[in-house]
Image (cartoon, rainbow, N blue to C red):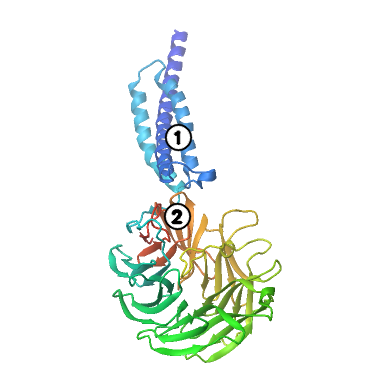
Amino acid sequence: MDDHGGGGLMERRGSRWRLVFAGLEGAVVAAAGTGFVMGGSALAEAGGACGSASGPCPPGTAAMLATGFVGLVVAIVLFIVVFLSDGPKMGRLVTTVVCCALALPVSLLGFDRLQGPPSVSPAWSAPADRPTLTKALAVWQDGGTVVRVRADRFDAYRARTGEAAWTLEAPPRKSVCAASQAVDGLAAVGYGTDPAPCDQLAAVDLRTGRELWRKDGVRPSVLELAGPETLVALDGERIAAFGLRDGAPAWTASPTAGCGFRALSASAARVVAAEYCATADPAAGTGTTWLRAFGPTGAALWRTDLGAANEPTTLAVLAADPPTVRLTERGDRGINAVLSFAAADGAPRATIPVSSADYELTSLRELYAPFRLRPVRPAAVVGDLFVAAATRPGDRDSRFVLAHSLTDGSRAWARVPDGKVLAVAAAPDGPLVVTERGRNLNAVHRLDGTDGRTVERTDLRRAFLYSTPWLGRTDDRYVFVNEDGTTYSRPALGVPRR
Protein backbone atom coordinates (compact mmCIF):
# COMPACT_ATOMS: atom_id res chain seq x y z
CA MET A 1 0.00 0.00 0.00
CA ASP A 2 2.80 2.38 1.03
CA ASP A 3 4.86 1.45 -2.03
CA HIS A 4 1.89 2.08 -4.30
CA GLY A 5 1.26 5.47 -2.67
CA GLY A 6 4.94 6.43 -2.99
CA GLY A 7 4.96 5.44 -6.67
CA GLY A 8 1.89 7.60 -7.34
CA LEU A 9 3.51 10.57 -5.67
CA MET A 10 6.63 10.20 -7.78
CA GLU A 11 4.45 9.85 -10.88
CA ARG A 12 2.62 13.08 -10.10
CA ARG A 13 5.87 14.94 -9.41
CA GLY A 14 7.36 13.65 -12.69
CA SER A 15 4.27 14.75 -14.57
CA ARG A 16 4.48 18.26 -13.13
CA TRP A 17 8.16 18.52 -14.05
CA ARG A 18 7.37 17.39 -17.57
CA LEU A 19 4.81 20.21 -17.82
CA VAL A 20 7.50 22.65 -16.67
CA PHE A 21 9.88 21.28 -19.28
CA ALA A 22 7.08 21.49 -21.87
CA GLY A 23 6.67 25.19 -21.11
CA LEU A 24 10.41 25.68 -21.32
CA GLU A 25 10.37 23.82 -24.64
CA GLY A 26 7.86 26.34 -26.00
CA ALA A 27 9.93 29.31 -24.86
CA VAL A 28 13.14 27.85 -26.32
CA VAL A 29 11.44 27.09 -29.65
CA ALA A 30 10.18 30.69 -29.82
CA ALA A 31 13.63 32.12 -29.08
CA ALA A 32 15.45 29.76 -31.45
CA GLY A 33 13.00 30.27 -34.28
CA THR A 34 13.05 34.04 -33.90
CA GLY A 35 16.86 34.02 -33.77
CA PHE A 36 17.11 31.98 -36.96
CA VAL A 37 14.56 34.09 -38.86
CA MET A 38 15.79 37.53 -37.79
CA GLY A 39 19.47 36.55 -37.92
CA GLY A 40 19.02 35.01 -41.35
CA SER A 41 17.17 38.10 -42.55
CA ALA A 42 20.00 40.35 -41.31
CA LEU A 43 22.53 38.08 -43.02
CA ALA A 44 20.56 38.23 -46.27
CA GLU A 45 20.49 42.05 -46.10
CA ALA A 46 24.27 41.93 -45.73
CA GLY A 47 24.47 40.09 -49.05
CA GLY A 48 24.72 36.59 -47.58
CA ALA A 49 28.15 37.11 -46.01
CA CYS A 50 29.65 39.36 -43.37
CA GLY A 51 32.51 39.51 -40.92
CA SER A 52 36.24 39.56 -41.60
CA ALA A 53 36.98 40.56 -45.21
CA SER A 54 33.27 40.75 -46.12
CA GLY A 55 32.75 43.73 -43.86
CA PRO A 56 31.08 44.09 -40.44
CA CYS A 57 27.89 42.15 -39.74
CA PRO A 58 24.64 44.00 -38.99
CA PRO A 59 24.26 44.60 -35.24
CA GLY A 60 22.94 41.58 -33.34
CA THR A 61 23.43 39.09 -36.19
CA ALA A 62 25.92 36.88 -34.35
CA ALA A 63 23.84 36.84 -31.14
CA MET A 64 20.64 35.96 -33.01
CA LEU A 65 22.19 33.13 -35.01
CA ALA A 66 23.98 31.79 -31.93
CA THR A 67 20.68 31.79 -30.02
CA GLY A 68 19.08 29.90 -32.90
CA PHE A 69 21.73 27.16 -32.98
CA VAL A 70 21.98 26.74 -29.19
CA GLY A 71 18.21 26.87 -28.87
CA LEU A 72 17.86 24.14 -31.49
CA VAL A 73 20.07 21.79 -29.47
CA VAL A 74 18.25 22.56 -26.22
CA ALA A 75 14.87 22.14 -27.91
CA ILE A 76 15.83 18.67 -29.18
CA VAL A 77 16.88 17.60 -25.66
CA LEU A 78 13.68 18.96 -24.15
CA PHE A 79 11.59 17.27 -26.83
CA ILE A 80 13.09 13.90 -25.88
CA VAL A 81 12.44 14.52 -22.18
CA VAL A 82 8.89 15.81 -22.66
CA PHE A 83 7.39 13.89 -25.54
CA LEU A 84 9.29 10.59 -25.66
CA SER A 85 8.59 9.68 -22.03
CA ASP A 86 5.56 7.81 -20.64
CA GLY A 87 2.27 9.44 -19.81
CA PRO A 88 -0.38 11.56 -21.56
CA LYS A 89 0.99 13.97 -24.15
CA MET A 90 -1.93 16.31 -24.85
CA GLY A 91 -1.42 18.46 -21.76
CA ARG A 92 2.28 18.80 -22.48
CA LEU A 93 1.60 19.80 -26.12
CA VAL A 94 -0.92 22.46 -25.06
CA THR A 95 1.58 23.83 -22.52
CA THR A 96 4.33 23.95 -25.16
CA VAL A 97 2.12 25.79 -27.67
CA VAL A 98 0.83 28.29 -25.10
CA CYS A 99 4.32 29.09 -23.78
CA CYS A 100 5.67 29.39 -27.31
CA ALA A 101 2.93 31.89 -28.15
CA LEU A 102 3.66 33.89 -24.98
CA ALA A 103 7.43 33.88 -25.53
CA LEU A 104 7.29 34.85 -29.21
CA PRO A 105 6.59 38.60 -28.77
CA VAL A 106 9.20 38.76 -25.99
CA SER A 107 11.78 37.18 -28.33
CA LEU A 108 10.86 39.57 -31.15
CA LEU A 109 11.21 42.57 -28.86
CA GLY A 110 14.53 41.38 -27.44
CA PHE A 111 16.14 40.69 -30.81
CA ASP A 112 14.74 43.92 -32.20
CA ARG A 113 16.59 45.76 -29.44
CA LEU A 114 19.76 43.90 -30.39
CA GLN A 115 19.47 45.21 -33.95
CA GLY A 116 19.47 48.81 -32.77
CA PRO A 117 17.15 51.61 -33.92
CA PRO A 118 14.57 50.84 -36.62
CA SER A 119 15.91 51.45 -40.12
CA VAL A 120 14.32 52.85 -43.26
CA SER A 121 14.73 51.94 -46.91
CA PRO A 122 15.26 54.46 -49.73
CA ALA A 123 12.03 56.14 -50.78
CA TRP A 124 13.33 56.40 -54.34
CA SER A 125 16.41 55.78 -56.44
CA ALA A 126 17.32 57.10 -59.87
CA PRO A 127 17.75 54.71 -62.82
CA ALA A 128 21.27 53.43 -63.44
CA ASP A 129 23.64 55.67 -65.37
CA ARG A 130 24.53 54.92 -68.98
CA PRO A 131 27.03 54.55 -70.60
CA THR A 132 28.80 52.41 -68.03
CA LEU A 133 31.92 54.56 -67.69
CA THR A 134 29.95 57.69 -66.81
CA LYS A 135 30.86 59.48 -63.58
CA ALA A 136 29.40 62.51 -61.87
CA LEU A 137 31.68 65.55 -61.66
CA ALA A 138 29.79 67.75 -59.19
CA VAL A 139 26.47 68.10 -57.35
CA TRP A 140 24.28 71.14 -56.75
CA GLN A 141 21.30 71.60 -54.44
CA ASP A 142 18.64 74.29 -54.57
CA GLY A 143 16.05 73.64 -51.88
CA GLY A 144 14.12 70.54 -52.90
CA THR A 145 16.01 70.07 -56.17
CA VAL A 146 19.31 68.19 -56.48
CA VAL A 147 21.35 68.37 -59.69
CA ARG A 148 23.89 65.72 -60.67
CA VAL A 149 26.52 67.13 -63.05
CA ARG A 150 27.98 64.81 -65.68
CA ALA A 151 30.43 65.67 -68.45
CA ASP A 152 27.65 65.60 -71.05
CA ARG A 153 24.57 66.80 -69.18
CA PHE A 154 22.88 67.94 -65.98
CA ASP A 155 20.19 65.73 -64.34
CA ALA A 156 17.88 67.38 -61.79
CA TYR A 157 15.81 65.34 -59.31
CA ARG A 158 13.03 66.26 -56.91
CA ALA A 159 14.38 65.40 -53.47
CA ARG A 160 11.02 64.21 -52.15
CA THR A 161 9.90 61.93 -54.98
CA GLY A 162 12.97 61.36 -57.15
CA GLU A 163 11.11 62.39 -60.29
CA ALA A 164 13.12 64.16 -62.98
CA ALA A 165 12.80 67.92 -62.62
CA TRP A 166 14.72 68.76 -65.79
CA THR A 167 17.68 67.72 -67.92
CA LEU A 168 20.09 70.07 -69.67
CA GLU A 169 22.50 68.82 -72.32
CA ALA A 170 26.00 70.26 -72.69
CA PRO A 171 26.64 72.06 -75.99
CA PRO A 172 27.42 69.77 -78.96
CA ARG A 173 30.92 68.25 -78.78
CA LYS A 174 31.56 70.13 -75.52
CA SER A 175 32.10 68.67 -72.04
CA VAL A 176 31.62 70.18 -68.61
CA CYS A 177 35.12 70.97 -67.34
CA ALA A 178 34.54 73.41 -64.45
CA ALA A 179 31.71 73.93 -61.96
CA SER A 180 31.00 76.37 -59.15
CA GLN A 181 28.94 75.81 -56.03
CA ALA A 182 25.23 76.72 -56.11
CA VAL A 183 23.93 79.96 -54.61
CA ASP A 184 20.33 81.21 -54.65
CA GLY A 185 19.28 78.84 -57.44
CA LEU A 186 22.19 79.66 -59.76
CA ALA A 187 25.48 77.98 -60.66
CA ALA A 188 28.29 78.55 -63.15
CA VAL A 189 29.94 76.02 -65.46
CA GLY A 190 32.80 75.87 -67.90
CA TYR A 191 32.67 73.98 -71.21
CA GLY A 192 35.53 72.70 -73.32
CA THR A 193 36.40 70.19 -76.02
CA ASP A 194 38.08 67.30 -74.24
CA PRO A 195 41.06 67.03 -73.71
CA ALA A 196 41.61 70.74 -74.36
CA PRO A 197 41.04 73.24 -71.50
CA CYS A 198 37.73 75.02 -70.97
CA ASP A 199 37.02 77.79 -73.47
CA GLN A 200 33.43 78.74 -72.61
CA LEU A 201 31.71 80.08 -69.50
CA ALA A 202 27.98 79.84 -68.72
CA ALA A 203 25.45 80.27 -65.92
CA VAL A 204 22.61 77.81 -65.23
CA ASP A 205 19.27 78.53 -63.56
CA LEU A 206 18.70 75.51 -61.30
CA ARG A 207 14.98 76.18 -60.97
CA THR A 208 14.21 76.04 -64.67
CA GLY A 209 17.11 74.07 -66.13
CA ARG A 210 17.96 76.82 -68.61
CA GLU A 211 21.23 78.53 -69.38
CA LEU A 212 21.07 82.24 -68.57
CA TRP A 213 23.98 83.06 -70.85
CA ARG A 214 27.09 81.58 -72.41
CA LYS A 215 30.23 83.32 -73.59
CA ASP A 216 33.41 82.37 -75.46
CA GLY A 217 36.95 83.56 -74.85
CA VAL A 218 37.09 82.61 -71.17
CA ARG A 219 39.35 79.77 -69.92
CA PRO A 220 37.91 78.86 -66.51
CA SER A 221 39.77 76.14 -64.62
CA VAL A 222 38.19 76.95 -61.24
CA LEU A 223 34.80 78.58 -60.63
CA GLU A 224 33.41 80.06 -57.41
CA LEU A 225 30.37 82.19 -56.63
CA ALA A 226 30.94 85.33 -54.58
CA GLY A 227 27.36 85.60 -53.42
CA PRO A 228 24.22 85.58 -55.60
CA GLU A 229 25.39 88.30 -58.00
CA THR A 230 29.04 87.57 -58.89
CA LEU A 231 30.98 84.60 -60.19
CA VAL A 232 34.76 84.41 -59.97
CA ALA A 233 36.88 82.33 -62.34
CA LEU A 234 40.51 81.35 -62.42
CA ASP A 235 40.79 82.43 -66.06
CA GLY A 236 44.17 81.33 -67.36
CA GLU A 237 46.73 83.13 -65.19
CA ARG A 238 44.36 85.73 -63.71
CA ILE A 239 41.25 85.93 -61.58
CA ALA A 240 38.26 87.31 -63.48
CA ALA A 241 34.87 88.22 -62.01
CA PHE A 242 31.60 88.39 -63.96
CA GLY A 243 27.99 89.24 -63.26
CA LEU A 244 26.32 85.94 -62.46
CA ARG A 245 22.98 86.86 -64.01
CA ASP A 246 24.25 88.48 -67.23
CA GLY A 247 27.92 87.48 -67.67
CA ALA A 248 29.08 91.10 -67.76
CA PRO A 249 32.80 91.54 -66.82
CA ALA A 250 33.16 92.95 -63.30
CA TRP A 251 36.85 93.02 -62.34
CA THR A 252 40.15 91.18 -62.72
CA ALA A 253 43.18 90.51 -60.53
CA SER A 254 46.61 89.33 -61.63
CA PRO A 255 49.04 87.21 -59.62
CA THR A 256 52.10 88.77 -58.05
CA ALA A 257 55.00 89.03 -60.51
CA GLY A 258 56.77 85.67 -60.77
CA CYS A 259 53.86 83.85 -59.08
CA GLY A 260 50.83 81.88 -60.18
CA PHE A 261 47.40 81.26 -58.67
CA ARG A 262 46.87 77.63 -57.61
CA ALA A 263 43.52 77.58 -55.75
CA LEU A 264 40.45 79.70 -55.15
CA SER A 265 37.40 80.03 -52.93
CA ALA A 266 34.82 82.78 -52.52
CA SER A 267 31.92 84.05 -50.45
CA ALA A 268 29.78 87.17 -50.56
CA ALA A 269 32.30 88.91 -48.29
CA ARG A 270 35.60 88.05 -49.99
CA VAL A 271 37.53 86.08 -52.60
CA VAL A 272 40.48 84.08 -51.25
CA ALA A 273 43.20 82.76 -53.57
CA ALA A 274 46.41 80.81 -52.96
CA GLU A 275 49.43 81.61 -55.10
CA TYR A 276 52.86 80.02 -55.36
CA CYS A 277 56.02 81.97 -56.12
CA ALA A 278 58.96 79.84 -57.26
CA THR A 279 62.55 80.83 -56.59
CA ALA A 280 64.88 81.87 -59.41
CA ASP A 281 65.47 78.18 -60.19
CA PRO A 282 62.04 76.52 -60.57
CA ALA A 283 63.68 73.09 -60.92
CA ALA A 284 64.80 73.35 -57.27
CA GLY A 285 61.21 73.00 -56.11
CA THR A 286 61.57 75.79 -53.57
CA GLY A 287 59.49 78.92 -53.23
CA THR A 288 56.90 80.77 -51.16
CA THR A 289 53.18 80.11 -50.93
CA TRP A 290 50.84 83.00 -50.19
CA LEU A 291 47.19 83.50 -49.40
CA ARG A 292 45.57 86.61 -50.89
CA ALA A 293 42.15 88.13 -50.23
CA PHE A 294 40.09 90.45 -52.43
CA GLY A 295 36.92 92.38 -51.64
CA PRO A 296 33.60 92.04 -53.50
CA THR A 297 34.74 94.69 -56.01
CA GLY A 298 38.22 93.21 -56.52
CA ALA A 299 40.12 95.47 -54.13
CA ALA A 300 43.16 93.76 -52.59
CA LEU A 301 42.58 93.23 -48.85
CA TRP A 302 45.64 91.36 -47.55
CA ARG A 303 48.42 88.91 -48.42
CA THR A 304 49.76 86.31 -45.97
CA ASP A 305 52.76 83.97 -46.17
CA LEU A 306 51.65 80.36 -45.48
CA GLY A 307 55.08 79.46 -44.14
CA ALA A 308 56.08 76.80 -46.68
CA ALA A 309 59.62 76.85 -48.07
CA ASN A 310 59.05 74.19 -50.74
CA GLU A 311 56.55 73.82 -53.56
CA PRO A 312 53.21 72.46 -52.31
CA THR A 313 52.02 69.06 -53.50
CA THR A 314 48.52 69.76 -52.18
CA LEU A 315 47.10 73.27 -52.03
CA ALA A 316 43.38 73.93 -51.70
CA VAL A 317 41.33 76.77 -50.25
CA LEU A 318 38.65 74.91 -48.30
CA ALA A 319 36.61 77.96 -47.31
CA ALA A 320 36.57 81.73 -47.55
CA ASP A 321 34.63 82.23 -44.28
CA PRO A 322 36.79 81.74 -42.31
CA PRO A 323 39.75 81.56 -44.73
CA THR A 324 40.88 77.92 -44.47
CA VAL A 325 43.62 76.20 -46.46
CA ARG A 326 44.73 72.61 -46.91
CA LEU A 327 48.51 72.58 -47.49
CA THR A 328 50.99 69.76 -48.00
CA GLU A 329 54.54 70.93 -48.63
CA ARG A 330 57.03 68.87 -50.62
CA GLY A 331 59.52 67.04 -48.40
CA ASP A 332 59.27 64.72 -45.40
CA ARG A 333 59.44 67.54 -42.85
CA GLY A 334 57.24 70.01 -44.70
CA ILE A 335 53.91 71.42 -43.59
CA ASN A 336 51.05 68.92 -43.79
CA ALA A 337 48.09 70.61 -42.14
CA VAL A 338 44.88 72.58 -42.34
CA LEU A 339 45.53 76.29 -41.72
CA SER A 340 43.05 79.02 -40.85
CA PHE A 341 43.42 82.80 -40.93
CA ALA A 342 41.64 85.87 -39.64
CA ALA A 343 39.14 87.20 -42.18
CA ALA A 344 39.92 90.85 -41.39
CA ASP A 345 43.69 90.91 -41.91
CA GLY A 346 44.87 87.37 -42.79
CA ALA A 347 46.67 86.84 -39.48
CA PRO A 348 47.35 83.11 -38.81
CA ARG A 349 44.87 81.60 -36.38
CA ALA A 350 45.09 77.80 -36.34
CA THR A 351 47.28 74.95 -37.52
CA ILE A 352 45.62 71.52 -37.50
CA PRO A 353 48.11 68.75 -38.32
CA VAL A 354 46.91 65.88 -40.49
CA SER A 355 48.84 63.40 -38.32
CA SER A 356 49.17 63.49 -34.53
CA ALA A 357 50.23 61.03 -31.85
CA ASP A 358 46.74 59.58 -31.35
CA TYR A 359 44.78 60.28 -34.54
CA GLU A 360 45.28 60.70 -38.26
CA LEU A 361 42.89 62.69 -40.46
CA THR A 362 42.80 59.96 -43.08
CA SER A 363 40.21 61.82 -45.14
CA LEU A 364 42.89 64.36 -46.04
CA ARG A 365 45.63 61.88 -46.95
CA GLU A 366 43.78 60.10 -49.74
CA LEU A 367 44.93 61.23 -53.16
CA TYR A 368 41.59 60.60 -54.86
CA ALA A 369 38.33 62.31 -53.99
CA PRO A 370 35.06 61.66 -55.84
CA PHE A 371 33.33 64.38 -57.89
CA ARG A 372 36.40 65.78 -59.62
CA LEU A 373 35.14 69.32 -60.22
CA ARG A 374 33.73 69.80 -56.70
CA PRO A 375 35.58 67.14 -54.65
CA VAL A 376 33.74 65.52 -51.76
CA ARG A 377 35.74 64.21 -48.80
CA PRO A 378 34.69 63.07 -45.32
CA ALA A 379 35.72 66.49 -43.96
CA ALA A 380 34.01 69.88 -43.79
CA VAL A 381 34.28 73.40 -42.43
CA VAL A 382 31.28 73.82 -40.11
CA GLY A 383 31.18 77.34 -38.72
CA ASP A 384 34.38 77.81 -36.75
CA LEU A 385 35.11 74.07 -36.64
CA PHE A 386 36.97 71.76 -38.98
CA VAL A 387 35.26 68.36 -38.74
CA ALA A 388 36.89 65.30 -40.34
CA ALA A 389 36.94 61.51 -40.31
CA ALA A 390 39.94 60.07 -38.50
CA THR A 391 41.60 56.80 -37.59
CA ARG A 392 43.81 55.56 -34.78
CA PRO A 393 47.41 54.63 -35.67
CA GLY A 394 47.45 51.10 -37.08
CA ASP A 395 43.72 50.96 -37.84
CA ARG A 396 42.48 50.53 -41.39
CA ASP A 397 39.07 52.22 -41.33
CA SER A 398 38.11 55.72 -40.22
CA ARG A 399 35.79 55.14 -37.26
CA PHE A 400 36.26 58.45 -35.47
CA VAL A 401 35.05 61.99 -36.12
CA LEU A 402 37.27 64.80 -34.84
CA ALA A 403 36.44 68.49 -34.57
CA HIS A 404 39.15 71.14 -34.28
CA SER A 405 38.69 74.81 -33.61
CA LEU A 406 39.58 77.06 -36.53
CA THR A 407 40.18 79.83 -34.01
CA ASP A 408 43.14 78.29 -32.18
CA GLY A 409 43.57 74.74 -33.57
CA SER A 410 42.58 73.01 -30.33
CA ARG A 411 40.63 69.76 -30.45
CA ALA A 412 37.00 70.52 -29.62
CA TRP A 413 35.74 66.94 -29.40
CA ALA A 414 36.14 63.39 -30.70
CA ARG A 415 33.32 60.92 -31.30
CA VAL A 416 32.86 57.29 -32.39
CA PRO A 417 29.59 57.35 -34.39
CA ASP A 418 28.96 53.57 -34.67
CA GLY A 419 30.65 52.41 -37.87
CA LYS A 420 33.09 53.33 -40.61
CA VAL A 421 32.78 57.02 -41.53
CA LEU A 422 31.92 57.48 -45.21
CA ALA A 423 31.00 61.16 -45.40
CA VAL A 424 31.01 64.39 -43.40
CA ALA A 425 28.90 67.32 -44.59
CA ALA A 426 28.22 70.80 -43.23
CA ALA A 427 24.72 71.87 -42.18
CA PRO A 428 23.50 75.04 -40.42
CA ASP A 429 22.55 73.08 -37.28
CA GLY A 430 25.68 70.91 -37.03
CA PRO A 431 27.79 68.43 -39.00
CA LEU A 432 26.18 65.47 -40.76
CA VAL A 433 28.05 62.16 -40.64
CA VAL A 434 27.32 59.08 -42.77
CA THR A 435 28.53 55.73 -41.41
CA GLU A 436 28.61 52.15 -42.63
CA ARG A 437 27.27 49.97 -39.77
CA GLY A 438 27.35 46.72 -41.73
CA ARG A 439 27.03 45.49 -45.24
CA ASN A 440 24.11 47.40 -46.84
CA LEU A 441 23.43 49.09 -43.48
CA ASN A 442 24.18 52.78 -42.99
CA ALA A 443 23.31 55.60 -40.63
CA VAL A 444 23.18 59.38 -40.83
CA HIS A 445 24.03 61.25 -37.63
CA ARG A 446 23.44 64.94 -37.06
CA LEU A 447 25.95 65.96 -34.42
CA ASP A 448 25.83 68.81 -31.96
CA GLY A 449 28.60 71.18 -32.97
CA THR A 450 29.46 72.04 -29.36
CA ASP A 451 30.26 68.53 -28.10
CA GLY A 452 29.77 66.09 -31.00
CA ARG A 453 26.91 64.10 -29.49
CA THR A 454 24.30 62.66 -31.85
CA VAL A 455 21.09 64.71 -31.71
CA GLU A 456 19.36 63.13 -34.73
CA ARG A 457 19.90 59.70 -36.24
CA THR A 458 18.44 57.92 -39.26
CA ASP A 459 19.35 54.26 -39.82
CA LEU A 460 18.93 53.00 -43.36
CA ARG A 461 19.23 49.69 -45.16
CA ARG A 462 19.90 48.72 -48.76
CA ALA A 463 21.19 52.15 -49.78
CA PHE A 464 24.30 50.55 -51.37
CA LEU A 465 26.77 53.28 -50.43
CA TYR A 466 30.20 51.91 -51.30
CA SER A 467 32.35 55.05 -51.28
CA THR A 468 32.10 58.68 -50.19
CA PRO A 469 28.72 60.00 -51.39
CA TRP A 470 27.54 63.57 -51.65
CA LEU A 471 24.92 64.20 -48.95
CA GLY A 472 22.13 66.75 -49.08
CA ARG A 473 19.16 67.36 -46.81
CA THR A 474 15.64 68.76 -46.97
CA ASP A 475 12.94 68.98 -44.29
CA ASP A 476 11.94 65.32 -44.72
CA ARG A 477 14.65 63.69 -46.86
CA TYR A 478 18.31 62.88 -47.00
CA VAL A 479 19.55 62.72 -50.58
CA PHE A 480 22.65 60.76 -51.52
CA VAL A 481 24.40 61.22 -54.86
CA ASN A 482 27.05 58.72 -55.96
CA GLU A 483 29.89 59.51 -58.31
CA ASP A 484 29.48 56.13 -60.03
CA GLY A 485 25.85 55.17 -60.55
CA THR A 486 26.32 52.55 -63.25
CA THR A 487 26.68 49.21 -61.43
CA TYR A 488 26.32 48.58 -57.68
CA SER A 489 25.19 52.07 -56.66
CA ARG A 490 22.40 54.22 -58.09
CA PRO A 491 23.17 57.77 -59.29
CA ALA A 492 20.94 59.30 -56.61
CA LEU A 493 18.52 58.16 -53.92
CA GLY A 494 16.29 59.74 -51.31
CA VAL A 495 15.82 58.45 -47.76
CA PRO A 496 13.16 59.57 -45.25
CA ARG A 497 14.54 61.43 -42.24
CA ARG A 498 13.69 60.15 -38.79
Quadrant, the N terminus:
top left
Residue 425 drawn at (x, y percent) = 47, 67
Residue depicted at 46% across the width and 32% down the height: 71
Residue 289 drawn at (x, y percent) = 63, 79
Residue 441 seen anywhere in this rendered image of the structure: yes
Nearest to the observer: residue 383 or residue 69: 383
Residue under label 2: 442
Nearest to the observer: residue 37 or residue 153: 153
Residue 415, picture quadrant: bottom right
Which badge, 1 or 2, is on the more N-terminal residue? 1
Q: Is residue 11 above or below residue 418?
A: above
Give the amino acid at mark 1.
Gly
Of all residues, the one furthest to the top in this rendering is 1
Residue 254 drawn at (x, y percent) = 54, 87
Quadrant, the C terminus:
bottom left
Give the amino acid at mark 2.
Asn
Helix, strand or loop at label 1? It is: helix
Residue depicted at 42% across the width and 36% down the height: 36
Q: Is residue 436 above or below residue 413?
A: above
Residue 184 seen anywhere in this rendered image of the structure: no
Q: Mark 2 Cα within 10 Å, few/some/many (few <14, many 20+)?
A: many
Disc 1 or disc 2, which is closer to the eye?
A: 2
Residue under label 1: 68
Residue 420 drawn at (x, y percent) = 52, 55
Looking at the image, residue 240 sits to the left or right of residue 495; the answer is right
Of all residues, the one furthest to the right in this rendering is 333
Residue 416, picture quadrant: bottom right
